[in-house]
Image (spheres, rainbow, N blue to C red):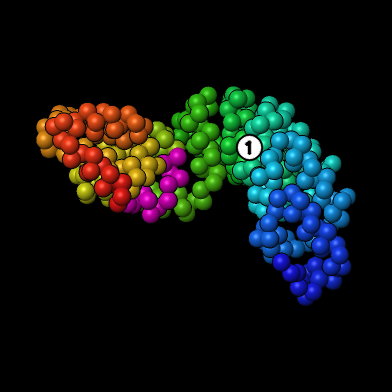
Amino acid sequence: MGLSRESSVGKYSEKKVEQVKTLFRNYGLDESHILHIARVQPKVFLYDPQNTLLPKLDFLLSIGVSNTDIPKVIVRNPALLGRSLEKQILPCYNFLKSLPLSGKEVVMMVNRNSRILATNVDKIASNVEVMQQAGVPPRSISYFISRFPASVQQDNEKFRKSLNEVISMGFNPLRLMFILAVRVLCETPKPTWDYKVEVFKRFGLSYGEVMSAFRLHPCCMNVSEEKMLRVMDFFINEMKWEPAVVVRSPAVLLYSLEKRIIPRCNVITILMQKGFLKENFPVMSFLKYNEKDFLNKFVDNYKDDLPQLVNVYSQGMAL
């Protein structure tokens, strides 16, 4: 990689730039990583490699970020290297561990979203306090922060509004679904939320039914609009199921249409046509089985009578 003299780092000595690049290479960053950093955060190459950059890289290693994950953490947020270790990164890390979060959970969070270490500690503390005041248990708060760091970094007013809206929907703060719902509302812009509600309504569902689905499984509103349309269209127009049946099991919207829904539905359709399943068979139940259990119960169990099921299933997977 060559950094142009016309770039913002060009006015500084090539010697320092090479020292920074060498340091990065020593910590597992390859040329594509270095080029990305030069493009999105070129001033990193102006920092003192030994006194500014090295202590932060060593800190990440010391808390348990692996050698293979160091490049990912840095590339996702190279600006982290410009934050003060003593005034920002360490205080934030210590606060996260006080929640309590185990060192392993903090590392998992850093790997997912290294911006958490550069977030204002007061902002995180304020959002944690809002959850505490709402009655969210400490363990749920730790779970929320470790798995959804982007949500806890939200503006305090937006976070409070999202949490209050979840309370108004009737979610129980003691249940996991509560924090999942907070996460969805925090990270879903209002226009996107409204459009997804309209997608459901296109299939004849009422607003109340959509909200019922959200209360059952909040993550169903994290599915992209395109996937919502494809999955709902398949169930209703191909399988001829009622929309209300689908939204009573909203988790199915998260499944892969090609790898799970279509091949399994192909198998179940044949079993019903051949009379091996009763008419009142709960249509959504088979989608929830893990792969091994589904094959055992619905394919292998009928291989003597319907040997073609193996091919039907595999051909569906190929689609």
Circle 1 crowding by C-alpha within 10 Å: few under 14, some 14–19, many from 20: some
Question: Which residue is at the front of the view, 283 or 72?
Answer: 72
Residue 50 percent across, percent down from the top left: 87, 51
In this rendering, position of residue 236 left or right of residue 27: left
Q: Which residues are magenta?
A: 219-232
- The image shows residue 31, relative to residue 233, as above or below, that is below
Say what amino acid the circle numbered 1 marks: Met
Residue 193 percent across, percent down from the top left: 45, 49
Examine the residues drawn in magenta and state their main secondary structure. helix
Mark 1, residue position: 108
Residue 125 shows in this picture: no
Question: Which residue is at the front of the view, 81 or 206?
Answer: 81
In this rendering, position of residue 131 left or right of residue 174: right
The residue at the point 42 percent across, 35 percent down is 217
Residue 10 percent across, percent down from the top left: 81, 71
In this rendering, position of residue 241 left or right of residue 65: left
